[in-house]
Image (cartoon, rainbow, N blue to C red):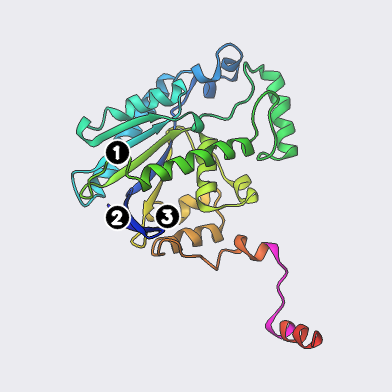
């Protein structure tokens, strides 16, 4: 567990940073298996399939191995944020079987990390046409009739993001400094990608290239020595390429491993280069001479 100091006027307050923030997608649901399920069952009530339950148990076992094998103390702790949908809650129940009660601090149902709203009951043929239109319009900005766009999801996930930081900054999770904290966010594929986009300041164009998480697949953001979180602490370059991260995005993840909290990565092309046409040094000097 890392302890960091913040300046707040003349006051200083310390807060504890989680060792890991783990994003998990729910197991296979009936809707993943059959699109027609959405025409008769509300999205939030779609259950897991038998395979989905098995996937959730496998995910719990994998998470237990990951956390217990990569901790400096056996006295680690977990705190869960979970979408209110039936499939995410059921996934959490299966994952929770692999952790003793002493390791679980608590669970909070968080409506802001729910699935993208597609608009009440969904008729398969109509949704097929709508999704084809979304591909033409752009996946981030297209708003489903009676539903949401990915941009709308970005807004509510951003609100959750701020609440999450307040929980951390004010130590509302009541963590002992000797205990390593793992925050697990059990949500949906789009919400997880949006969370990463917000956290790492990825552009809309970069978001559009990201692949969705598979059922019960997870992403591990691990805390580096300097206080920044990085996907590259746990995941390989090959994995990140498969997820749709560009070489520049992967280089930024590697930089974050040793970066100090608050440092600015000047090599991130999407922070600067994509918005300006740069001249060479010689051209810059000539431009300055011409303006004298």
Q: Could you tell whether 222 is left or right of 45 in the image?
A: left
**Most foreground residue, 154 or 35:** 154
**Residue 97 occupies quadrant:** top left
Q: Residues within 10 Å of mark 3 (few under 14, many from 20)?
A: many
Quick check: is 54 in the magenta stretch?
no
Residue 70 placement (x, y as % from top left):
26, 50
Distance from disc 3 to disc 2, alpha carbons, whole Å, reads: 15 Å
Residue depth check, mark 1 versus mark 2: number of the one nearer the observer: 2
**Residue 142 occupies quadrant:** top right
Distance from disc 3 to disc 1, alpha carbons, whole Å, reads: 19 Å
Q: Residues within 10 Å of mark 2 (few under 14, many from 20)?
A: some
Region of the chain picked out in magenta, as a range: 275-283
Numbered tag placed on residue 78 in the rendering: 1
Furthest toward the top, the residue is: 40
- Is residue 219 among what the camera can see? no
Badge 1 element: strand
Residue depth check, mark 3 versus mark 2: number of the one nearer the observer: 2
Furthest toward the front, the residue is: 10
Q: Are marks 3 and 1 in contact (CB under 8 Å)?
A: no
Q: Residue at x 81, y 86 (%)?
A: 290
Quick check: is 282 in the magenta stretch?
yes
Numbered tag placed on residue 230 in the rendering: 3
Q: Residue at x 72, y 27 (%)?
A: 130
**Most foreground residue, 7 or 158:** 7
Badge 3 element: strand
Q: Residue at x 52, y 39 (%)?
A: 159
Q: Vertically, is 120 above or below 83?
A: above
Q: Could you tell whether 139 is left or right of 46 in the image?
A: right
Residue labelled with disc 2: 2
- In primary-sequence order, the first of circles 3 and 1 is 1
Badge 2 element: strand
Residue 162 placement (x, y as % from top left):
48, 43
């Amino acid at each position: 567990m890392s302890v960091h100091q913040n300046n707040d006027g003349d006051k200083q307050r310390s807060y504890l940073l989680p060792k890991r923030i783990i994003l998990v997608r729910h197991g296979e649901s009936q809707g993943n298996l059959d699109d027609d399920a959405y025409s008769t069952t509300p999205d939030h009530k779609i259950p897991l399939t038998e395979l989905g339950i098995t996937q959730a148990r496998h995910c719990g076992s994998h998470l237990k191995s990951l956390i217990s094998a990569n901790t400096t103390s056996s006295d680690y702790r977990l705190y869960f944020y979970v979408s209110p949908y039936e499939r995410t809650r059921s996934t959490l129940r299966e994952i929770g079987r692999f952790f003793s009660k002493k390791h679980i601090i608590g669970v909070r149902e968080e409506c802001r990390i729910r699935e993208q709203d597609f608009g009440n009951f969904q008729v398969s043929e109509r949704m097929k046409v709508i999704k084809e239109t979304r591909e033409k319009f752009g996946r981030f900005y297209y708003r489903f009739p009676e539903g949401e766009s990915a941009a709308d999801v970005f807004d509510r996930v951003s609100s959750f993001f701020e609440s999450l930081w307040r929980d951390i900054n004010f130590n509302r999770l009541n963590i002992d400094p000797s205990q390593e904290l793992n925050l697990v966010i059990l949500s949906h594929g789009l919400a997880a990608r949006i969370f990463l986009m917000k956290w790492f300041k990825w552009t809309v164009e970069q978001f559009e290239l990201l692949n969705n998480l598979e059922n019960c697949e997870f992403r591990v953001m691990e805390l580096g020595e300097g206080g920044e979180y990085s996907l590259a602490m746990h995941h390989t370059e090959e994995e990140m390429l498969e997820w749709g991260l560009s070489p520049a995005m992967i280089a930024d993840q590697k930089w974050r491993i040793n970066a100090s909290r608050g440092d600015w990565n000047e090599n991130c092309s999407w922070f600067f280069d994509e918005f300006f046409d740069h001249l060479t040094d010689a051209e810059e000097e000539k431009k300055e001479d011409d303006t004298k």
